[in-house]
Amino acid sequence: MVKKAFLVGINDYPGSGSDLKGCANDVTNIRDILLKYSGFTVKEIRVLTDRRATKSNIMKRLEWLIDGAKAGDLLIFQYSGHGSQIRDRDGDELKDHLDEILCPYDMDWDGNFITDDELGALFKQLPTGVRLEVFLDSCHSGTGTRYLPEFGTEGERYVRTKFLQPPVDILCRLEDDLPVKRIGDFFSRVSANPVRKIKVNHILWAGCQDNQTSADAFIKGTYNGAFTYFLCKHVRDTGGRVNRSDLLKRLCASLRYEGYDQVPQLEGIPEAKKRLLFE
């Protein structure tokens, strides 16, 4: 059995004014539980952060991840950083007509981003029996927002929206192309069923529903993605012996108790949800 993991964390978004703080810590957190609780070795894990996490480098590492995969192999892909949405151009987004995107370090709105369609096309290449587990601490299924809780001069907590908003020219195209009444609808459209029912060949952990935000948060003295922080906490608390459904329940309870609005999602084959994480 072959094990491979590819982890991405991006805090620095040059020129965007929307830098994050906890994404590099998310990478080291996931890496730690892979090494301690799932039998990964250092050589089996590849990491990209900040300026090295360009679209080209991310796509090359994703190709490495799936290359030569066979039934029984275990693959992990983790991404922590900004996400957003663009107009769907191939007609497969029937509800909201939008594609979800991951935002690399060299993100621009002329195509230098990674769409859910690109990820789907890669993952479809995997043969039957390969175990792929994906962790997205971003707006993968959402509206493209990560928010950053900070502390004011007297210690009060507040939330700063971290939506990577398309520029005006992109929004104007959306107003013309999408069946919505105004540009503002792009940000307010919410499906009656926020989790799309699609056939997948992998396990997907998403940090929130598609009408919610994922938090870049200050937790116990350091910045982290709230989703990744509490997921790793519960893996450690259980010594790595927790099934996915129970882990999801613990994760949701912790985020709710700590005051985060996001509701994590677990998508995949029902039988896999009952098995231990990484199995």
Image (cartoon, helix red, strand yellow):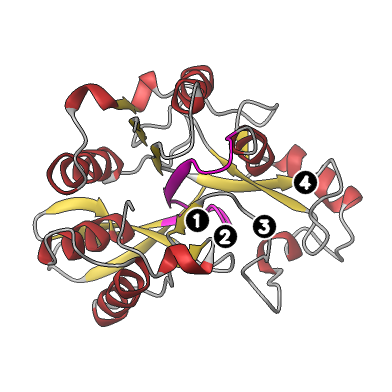
Magenta span? 126-146
- Work out how far the residue at label 4 is from the one at label 2, CA to CA, in angstroms: 14 Å
Q: Quadrant of residue 143?
A: bottom right
Identify the residue under disc 1.
Answer: 145
Position of residue 23 relative to residue 63, above or below, is: below
**Amino acid under label 4?**
Arg
Circle 3 or circle 2, nearest the eye: 3
Where residue 204 appears, as percent x and y from the top left, is 48, 55
- Work out how far the residue at label 1 is from the one at label 4, CA to CA, in angstroms: 17 Å
Identify the residue under disc 3.
Answer: 199
- Work out how far the residue at label 1 is from the one at label 2, CA to CA, in angstroms: 8 Å
265 and 271: which is toward the camera? 271
**Amino acid under label 1?**
Thr
Circle 3 or circle 1, nearest the eye: 3
The image's mark for residue 142 is 2
Q: Name which residue lies at 90% across and 49% down.
A: 176
Asked if the magenta segment contains residue 133, the reply would be: yes
- Answer whether labels 1 and 2 touch (C-beta < 8 Å): yes
